[in-house]
Amino acid sequence: MKKTLSKKNLISYLANQLSNFFPDEKYNDYSAKLNLSMEVSLTRTEYCFSKINNKYFKNDKEVIFNHLNGDQYAMFLYILSNQIYIDSEYLDLATKIYLLNKYLHGIDAYYEVELPKIFIFIHPLGTVLGRAKYSDFLVVYQRCGIGDNKGNSPILGEYLTLHPGASIIGKSVIKKNCSVGSNSLVKDFELAENKVFTGNPSSYKLFDNFKINKIWN
């Protein structure tokens, strides 16, 4: 993977960000603790980016990670916070990275939430990704919301695209290759394969969609 910062410099860059945003002296050396989960996180990031058909993520089949690309850095920060949560007892560090992601990119992607291995954020300002069963090839834009309703969480199939302002909550089951239109709400609803949902629980329309999102290989 072609990186705009080496692993060592990326750790230093992130450590400096954390020190500036959270000057509580909880950790004297962020770098050492970040290093414990960095290699696996970069491997996960490379695998995820390798599946994305976009010139900013892959050029001539070489995967690119640009720390100044907001979407890429937001994805990486989620992956790293999740990996730290998996690897160690440093939950304060995972929390700070989660909060840093919220501060920098306006996305709420909590480290305990298991996002799929293959996903993409597209300028995800105002997006909240809560409890759900996620599947690969997930696309989320700005102002999207996923979460539970009365203790029930959605089950999401592969190749799901959430357009700006789309939300899925509650006891919803979304089958393979579905899309939720802009400013639409799916609540306690089962959506069959290859469908586009637009509207809300009281007034909605369904359309056929048999094409896979072109952003995926």
Image (cartoon, rainbow, N blue to C red):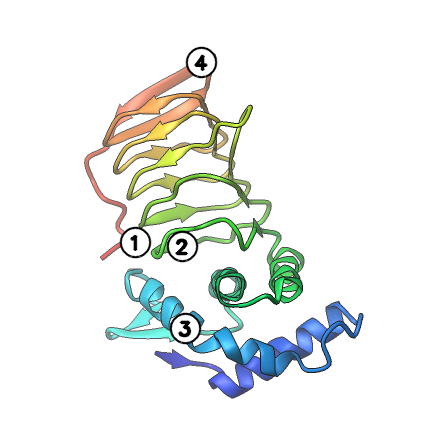
Distance between the alpha carbons at the discs numbered 2 and 1: 9 Å
Which residue was labeled with disc 2? Answer: 120
Amino acid, disc 1: Ile
Amino acid, disc 4: Ser
Q: Residue at x 53, y 27 (%)?
A: 151
Q: Earlier in the sequence, mark 3 or mark 4?
A: 3
Out of 91 and 172, give the one closest to the viewer: 91
Distance between the alpha carbons at the discs numbered 1 and 4: 30 Å
Few, some or many residues within 10 Å of mark 2 (<14, 14–19, 20+): many
Few, some or many residues within 10 Å of mark 4 (<14, 14–19, 20+): few
Which residue was labeled with disc 3? Answer: 40
Give coordinates of residue 108: x percent, y percent.
59, 49
Q: Earlier in the sequence, mark 2 or mark 4?
A: 2
Q: Secondary structure at mark 4?
A: strand
Q: Secondary structure at mark 1?
A: loop
Residue 56 visible: no
Q: Are marks 1 and 3 in contact (CB under 8 Å)?
A: no
Few, some or many residues within 10 Å of mark 1 (<14, 14–19, 20+): few
Which residue was labeled with disc 1? Answer: 215
Q: Are marks 2 and 1 in contact (CB under 8 Å)?
A: yes
Q: Earlier in the sequence, mark 3 or mark 2?
A: 3
Q: Quadrant of the N terminus?
A: bottom left
Give coordinates of residue 193: x percent, y percent.
23, 30
Relative placement, left or right, of 115 versus 99 is: left
Q: Are marks 1 and 4 in contact (CB under 8 Å)?
A: no
Q: Quadrant of the C terminus?
A: bottom left
Quarter of the image for residue 216 reads: bottom left
Q: Earlier in the sequence, mark 2 or mark 1?
A: 2
